[in-house]
Amino acid sequence: FNYGWVVAMAGFFMHLCLGTMYCWGTFTPYITSYLRKYNPALDYNDTIIVFLITPLAQAIGMPIGGMIENKVGPRMTALIGSWMMAFGVFVSCYTTTVFQLTMTYGITYGIGMGIAYMVPIACGYKWMPKRKGIISGIVVTGFGCGGALFNIIGAGICNPDNLAPSPYFGNSVADQVPRMFMTLGCIYVVATTLGALLLADPSPEDLAALKAGEEPAGEAAPIVPKEHPSTDVDLLGVLQNPKGYLLWAMMGASTSSGVLVVGTYKMLGASAGLNDQLLTIVGSLSLVFNGLGRLFYGGLSDNIGYKSTMIIVFFFQACLGALFISSAVNQYVYSACVCAMVMNYGANFPLFPTVTAELFGTKHVASNYGFVFSGFATAGIMLKFALKSSLGFPTVVMATAIASACAGGGIFVLTGAGASAADKLKQDV
């Protein structure tokens, strides 16, 4: 039995809580209504900065987590990050301004999440170096599914009677927001602690057995050939490599549609006349698809290669993005479109760590992926300014669809400019 499976499942349960940044689409009507008690001039375009700043904080936390892990190991690093994340959520119950909430639910939560995010993935890579796609997929499936679970919990605390906003909630819903933050913070600290305690790097004996190919009977043959070279490049090396910047740009372009949908699906649906309970269900269901997509696409990349998988995801997302607004005319079409877009969006998160590890090695993958991931954070900030500009919502939506298609084109540049021999073999499968 390979302990990597235990690490992957421990990471899954940690990511159930780390992934609750995706609850923002459901929580934003409650949170914005609460903050409007202290500043009635606030609207949804003001509070979305909290959601958009979180990935930036996460990108800052990732290389910090990599450095901490090299010093104290995966278990303590995961505990530090998880406790910081849970603290940020809990103290949000005392916030009364967008700035305060950005500091707690955006920056503190995001940095803590970033510190813990890559720890179980990097640890799993050490146990199962030939199964990077499925390890990433299992762990980050929790990141997608967690939002679905905690969407229901948060909505149950704040809006148990399924009241409709117009476009904001009254005090009966808004006043429950501090209690929601306190409850979620307590749940997060317990759940992530249990997962973090199961993390452990392989011992020298385990590494020797893995290197000799002494894996448990019945485990699939490695996909990556044994002649695959070791290419452990640190962050400085990535910053000196054009492929690092191309990955960064592709990450931002390919995730932009998903960020937009997660942050605005409820607002768009409400404007089209869909009720709050339905939209909460759609949000939770879409996050289940997000999680399943991570697992499916992670496994798929192990079998057909990341190039083919990314091409499928990015061009499919471009087509869906072009249909997003028009799909709101029917609740079933809208639900299907949101679920499919969030599923494709989630595919980025097992794929890009896998590509990063394949191109630059696993030793510094937490720090290296932190840089690549910052492309996602940058896209979020750019969307904030675009939504506040005079471009208009339909124009911004179409721009994100075009960006997804551009990311698909970037695959050919990336793999044509120095992909490893092993990766080329995988692409030909």
Image (cartoon, rainbow, N blue to C red):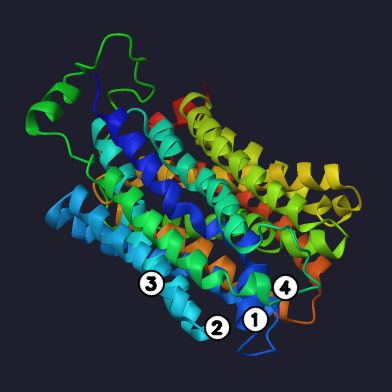
The residue at which mark 4 appears reads as 169
Residue at label 2? 98
List the residue tagged with mark 3. Answer: 108
Q: Quadrant of residue 399?
A: bottom right
- In space, the residues marked 2 and 4 are separated at their CA atoms by 17 Å
In primary-sequence order, the first of circles 4 and 1 is 1
In the image as oriented, which residue stretches furthest toward the top?
Answer: 217
Q: Amino acid at mark 2?
A: Val
Q: Earlier in the sequence, mark 1 or mark 2?
A: 1
Residue 309 drawn at (x, y percent): 57, 35
**Percent position (x, y) of residue 253?**
61, 58
Mark 1 highlights which residue? Answer: 46
* Quarter of the image where one finds residue 110: bottom left
Please give the name of the residue rendered at 46% of the width and 69% of the height, measured from the top-left corner: 56
Identify the amino acid type marked 1: Asp
Binning the other alpha carbons within 10 Å of mark 3 as few (below 14), some (14 to 19) or many (20 upward) gives: many
As measured in the structure, the alpha-carbon distance from the residue carrying label 3 to the one carrying label 4 is: 27 Å
- Give above or below for 418 relative to 161: above
- Residue 384 visible from this viewpoint: no
Q: Nearer the viewer, mark 4 or mark 1?
A: 4
Q: Which of 349 and 416 lies nearest the eye of the viewer?
A: 349
